[in-house]
Image (spheres, helix red, strand yellow):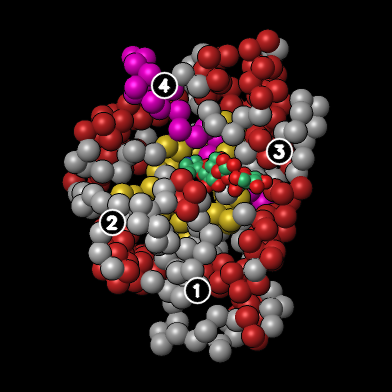
Amino acid sequence: MKLTRRAVAAGLPLAIAQPALAAPLRLGEAAARAGLRYGTAIEPQTVENDPAFAALVLDQCDLITPENALKWNALRPDRNHFDFAAADRVAAFARRARAPMHGHTLVWHEAIPDWAIHELKTGDPRALLVDHITTVVRRYAGRVVSWDVINEPVERNDRRPDGLRKSPWFEALGPDYLEIALRAAHAADPKARLAIADYGLEYDDIGWMVEKRGTMLDLLRGLKSRGVPLHALALQGHLLGDHPPAFGAGLSQFLRQVAALGLAIYVTELDVNDQHMAGDIAQRDRSVAEIYAAFVRAVATEPATQIVVTWGLADRYTSKVDFFPRPDGKPVRPLPFDADLRPKPAAQALADAFASRRRS
Ligand code: G3I
């Protein structure tokens, strides 16, 4: 067994330190050498109840995202109270890791409690939104260094000319909800980097994704031209295991256009959905690794890219189990480390993809 620097810092006993690897792999270090920051999304109970998993996160990650603890349904039991318990537990772990946090998320059409949906229809939606953002962003100022202020604002199927999703926020406040939220977040913590995050921007050969890039660019341009505080576009990066990697000139050009607006690029929810992938475990793992490699190489080549966060670190804990189970009943394997916390080919692929940035 090898006792890593991070495990020692965390006061973890030898028995749960990461097993020695032939060539020690630290994704955080590989990213940092390339001028990137690598991290993962976590739930507080996993790192509290599973010391081996906590040690792996401490060893590999330099950025922590609360997977669910900063969502409205976690923070807001009712109109008059905030419950920061779960988010504070994630913040305590991030402190142990000596890592900043990326905040997820202040405005989303999901994970809104029923009382808030009601209030959006009958109360003062602007006050509700601004009060929430001000309270939450102020509390974590200096610890949450970047925020998914708005998550998933574009839904072309809602058939609005501007492509905006008809979310509860949109229905209550109209298109202005984006600007209201971003200005409130900026006022609450002027140093925090503010992002808009969305899925379905990754693939060059999926028509609706290519179109969504255009819609997103228009949205970003509009906000920037009005001087709205906005610092980054976050690509979620939920990649498709049953679709060939298609991260070529189209993606590069899109990232260039985003960067030309003065925005940074984040990847905030990276994983590979292996729900419908054929083959044995070794074949699947190789294909998953190739998909990670192709995508991260493409985004890492863009100088504006700053952050890469995977939506989980090891297959032991992934919401893909619930949302995308395999029809053959076998465990899903979407993340860089396996359920036994051993590095998979995807982990090495990520490290190599980070390193490729230094050579490009
Ligand atoms: O906390 C309860 C627990 O008490 C209960 O026993 C359990 C039973 O199902 O449910 C638990 O809550 C679940 C929670 O995850 C924690 O596990 C919710 O039902 C479930 O809806 C929630 O799902 C999360 C989902 O967002 C909705 O908020 C997933 O963990 C999370 O991975 C997923 O993340 C989203 C991003 O926020 C946005 N982008 C897509 C991504 C999913 O891939």
Q: Where is residue 265 in the image (x, y as percent from the top left)?
A: 40, 46
State the residue position of label 4.
164
Instruction: Residue 329: say if magenta.
Output: no
* Sequence-first disc among 3 and 1: 3
Report the disc number at residue 216: none
Q: Quadrant of the N terminus?
A: bottom right
Q: How far apart are marks 1 and 4 (CA)?
A: 42 Å
- Ligand 1 within 8 Å of disc 1? The answer is no
* Sequence-first disc among 1 and 2: 2
Name the element at disc 2.
Answer: loop
What kind of residue is marked 1?
Asp
Residue nearest the observer in this picture, 30 or 239: 239
* Vertical side of 23 occupied by 73: above or below: above
Q: Mark 3: few, some, or many residues within 10 Å (few <14, many ≥20)?
A: many
State the residue position of label 2.
277
- Ligand 1 within 8 Å of disc 4? The answer is no
- Ligand 1 within 8 Å of disc 3? The answer is no
Residue at figure coordinates x 55%, y 63% from the top left: 62
Can residue 62 be seen at all in this image of the molecule? yes
- Is the residue under label 3 in contact with that under label 4 (CB below 8 Å)? no
Residue at figure coordinates x 63%, y 80% from the top left: 16
Give the extent of the magenta segment. Answer: 142-165
Residue at figure coordinates x 76%, y 28% from the top left: 78
Location of residue 34 (image quadrant) = bottom left
| Left or right, 86 with reference to 37 | right
